[in-house]
Image: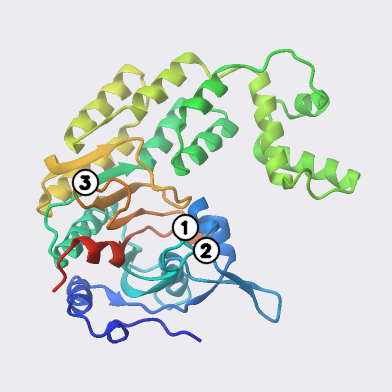
Amino acid sequence: MIETAAPGATGSAAWAETLLLSFAEAGYVQSEPAILQPAEPFLDLSGEDIRKSLYLTTDATGEELCLRPDLTIPVARDYLASSHAGQPAGFCYLGPVFRYRGGRPSEFLQAGIESFGRRDRAAADAEMLALGLEATATFGLTDVDIRTGDVGLFNALLDALDLFPVWRRRLIKDFNREISLEQDIEHLMVATGPAHNEYQGVLAALAGSDRKAALALVTDLMSIAGATNVGGRSVSEIADRFLEQSTLKGGGLPREKREAIRRFLAISGDPDDALAQLRLLAGDARLELNPAIDQFESRIGFMAARGIDTAKVRFSTSFGRGLDYYTGFEFELHAKGNGTEPLVAGGRYDGLMTQLGASAPIPAVGFSIWIEALKQVGSAP
C-alpha cells in the first residue's frame, strides 16, 4: 500500500518543514489518514468536480473504495473515530491526493488545516483565513487576492423568504454548483399553468406535501409498478421532480421574493461595504437576517484583530466553492491576475460531521493548500 507522504517523503524540503512547523506552533497536530478511503462519503457529499474525478476500486467484500481525492473528509473521519470526537481539536496535514485532471498528474500534494469543535465560529473563521495567508507567505507571496463569501447568509435569506422546501433545495443546489441562478429564478417565477399533464393525479396528491411525504408516495407507486428507477433517475430524484412540478402548479415564485434574491446576489465589495448593503436589504425587504448578518460582522472584527486588512478583502454574496458540504464562510486566495486556480481554499462545513456519523452537530472549518500552484508562483525557502 502507498504510504502517506510525510515531510521526509518530499525530500525534507525546507518549505514543507516551515509550513508544518507554523501549523504546529498554532496548535495543530499533524494527521496522516489512510490513502485508501470508503468511496461513499465522497460520492454523496463532495461537489460534482470531485465526484467525476475519483479513482474507484472494490475490495473482496464488495465495498467500493477510492484513492482519497482530498484530505478534509479523511481527517474528519479519523477525528470522529478518535477519543477526541466532539471536543475542540485541530489537525494539519501534508500528503498526496489523487484526482483525474485531464492530462495533468493525477497524484499531487495537498496541505491544510481542519479545526473541529470550536463554538467561537467567527473567531475560528478568521483564524483560518489568517493561517491561509501565513501559508502563502511561506512561499514568498505576501500580496494575494482574497475572495470570500458565506453560503450561510444565502441559506438565511431563503429561510427568511419562507420558500417552499422544493424551491429552497433547488436554489441551494445551484448555488453550490457555482452555476447561474438566474435561469432557475425565472423558472420558479412562472407557474406551469393549466396545461394537461399525464401525471395530473400524482401532482394533485402531492399538493402541499413535504419531501418526506412525496418520497413515500413515489416509493409506493414505483413498488407497485415493480420499478426502482425510471430513465436513470432514482426514487428520490423522481419524488423531487414531482414535488417541484406540483409546487409550480400552485403558483410561481412571487416577484418580490425573486427581486430580494436578485438584490442579495448582487451584493459585493469589501466586507464593510457588503455589511452595510446587507443591513439595508434586510430593512427594505423586512427580512429577519440579523443573526446571520451579526455573525458576518463579528467575523470582520476578528479578521481585523488578526491583522488582516479588510479593505483588501473582496466579499460577494454569490461566491461559492462548488462543494456540497459548505455551510458558512468560504474563501479562496489567488495569485494576482489568476482568477481561476486558487492557491489556498476553504471554509466552514458544520453539517459534514453528522453526515459522517456524529451523533450531534460539531462545528468544523478548515482549508486546503494547493502546493503545486503555490510552488509555481512563489519562491519557497
- In the rendered structure, the answer to whether residue 347 lies left or right of residue 244 reads left
What amino acid is at disc 1?
Leu
Q: Residue at x 21, y 44 (%)?
A: 298
Q: Which structural element holds mark 1?
A: helix
Estimate the x, y position of residue 34 in percent, counting from the top left: 47, 79
Number of other residues with Cα within 10 Å of mark 3, as a class: few under 14, some 14 to 19, many 20 or more: few
User: For mark 2, what is the residue?
Assistant: 356
Cβ–Cβ below 8 Å for labels 1 and 2?
yes
Nearest the viewer among 265 and 291 is: 265
Q: Is residue 31 in sight in this rendering?
A: yes
- In the rendered structure, the answer to whether residue 77 lies left or right of residue 65 reads left
User: For mark 3, what is the residue?
Assistant: 337
Q: Residue at x 23, y 66 (%)?
A: 375
- In the rendered structure, the answer to whether residue 314 lies left or right of residue 233 reads left
| Image depth: mark 1 or mark 3 in front | 3
Label drawn at residue 127: none
Q: Is residue 264 above or below residue 331?
A: above
**CA–CA distance in space, label 3 to label 2:** 37 Å
Q: Is residue 70 above or below residue 24?
A: above
User: For mark 1, what is the residue?
Assistant: 352
Nearest the viewer among 27 and 361 is: 27
Number of other residues with Cα within 10 Å of mark 2, as a class: few under 14, some 14 to 19, many 20 or more: some
